[in-house]
Image (spheres, rainbow, N blue to C red):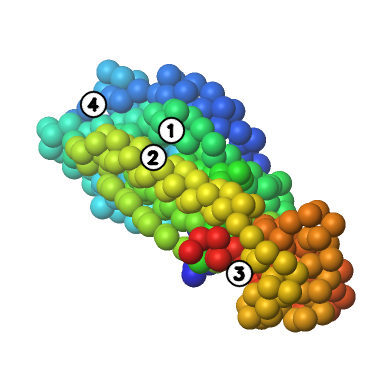
Amino acid sequence: MQNLTRASAELFRRTEDECFESLSALSVHLRAKKERSEDRWQPPTQLEASPIDGGLLLNAGSDGAFLMNDWSFGQLCKLAGVGKETVNRLSPETASQVFAETLPRGQKPLQLFTEGEDLRSIHGTSYTRLYDADLVAMLQEFAVDFEPPQKGFNGATGLYAGEQDLFCFLIDPAGWTEIGGEAFAPGFFIWNSEVGRRSLGIQTFWFQAVCQNHIVWDAVDVFEFTRKHTANVHESLREIRRIIEALVAKRDERRDGFAKVIQRAMEEKLGDDAEEVMKVLQKNGITRSAAKQALEIAARQGRFTIFTLVDSLTRIARETNNAGDRTDADEKASKLLSLAAA
């Protein structure tokens, strides 16, 4: 089993304006952002940094001038081959001169991604964008039973979209099934960046608990898929859809299997009379005292089925004062269900 901390790291680094209450609210935000955004193609010779109000504008030929954010400014520095920290110490006038002397002068076009008057990113021709809105639209269509976990200690939801990237933490709260005698539910993390901050990816898992720090405890069947934003990134969206569909199919298979076990447990008897049932219970580690109490409860219901006796033993365990004894009794009772799975 693994403890997964990816969602916890997101919870602690996100600001309030990056958190969303639901997939629908997140989707509305991302669709509007997509509609406001535009790709512009300009050769490096058309790029010019100019000082304005203590900062820099990037002039992009006939497309106009744009304000840079921290991410796009860092990309411009990388393109020019100058240190971001060094340029930040210069006056806007000096910084503009540095870019005038260091920006490449080739004719191969650059991809400028803008939103209104803001420059979100700068990429070469090999970069292929996958919009966050398209990824969330796929989730709304194919992950309909999944929702964010309980809110984190600071009110964070597990659904985040910021200037640089997207991250979603979703679980199926009704998908609990039994794996190896223990209860697990399915969930996944999914992430993307429209501006090249991180790859596209998904991590699916089955978990036992999520704490208020959004640490996923005791995860099994952990699977991860990632892709860079190259020409085939949209094909990867279909692959992620297939992964989610496979997770849903596995959930249904496991849930149906567990339901069949419960149905058998409700129908199959441990014995025809109290004496025979007592022997079976003791053979499976149930103390004579607990077995006697369970038999009395089951007798009042008029049947000695596996389910009735497991239910009776679980009730008895709840009345046990010692936590360790209570856990031990619960485990022994739940193991009786395996008799119905045989």
Q: Is residue 262 visible?
A: no
Q: Earlier in the sequence, mark 1 or mark 4?
A: 4
| Amino acid on which disc 1 is placed | Phe
Furthest residue toward left? 107
* Front residue (pair 280, 201): 280
Residue 335: mark: 3
Instruction: Name the residue that disc number 2 marks.
Output: 245
Secondary structure type for disc 3: helix
Mark 4 surroundings within 10 Å by alpha-carbon count, few (fewer than 14), some (14 through 19), many (20 or more): some
Q: Nearer the viewer, mark 1 or mark 4?
A: 1
Task: Identify the image quadrant of residue 111.
Answer: top left
Residue 142: mark: 1
- Give the x, y percent position of residue 210: 62, 57
- Give the x, y percent position of residue 46: 23, 28
Mark 1 surroundings within 10 Å by alpha-carbon count, few (fewer than 14), some (14 through 19), many (20 or more): some
Q: Nearer the viewer, mark 4 or mark 2?
A: 2
- Give the x, y percent position of residue 71: 42, 44
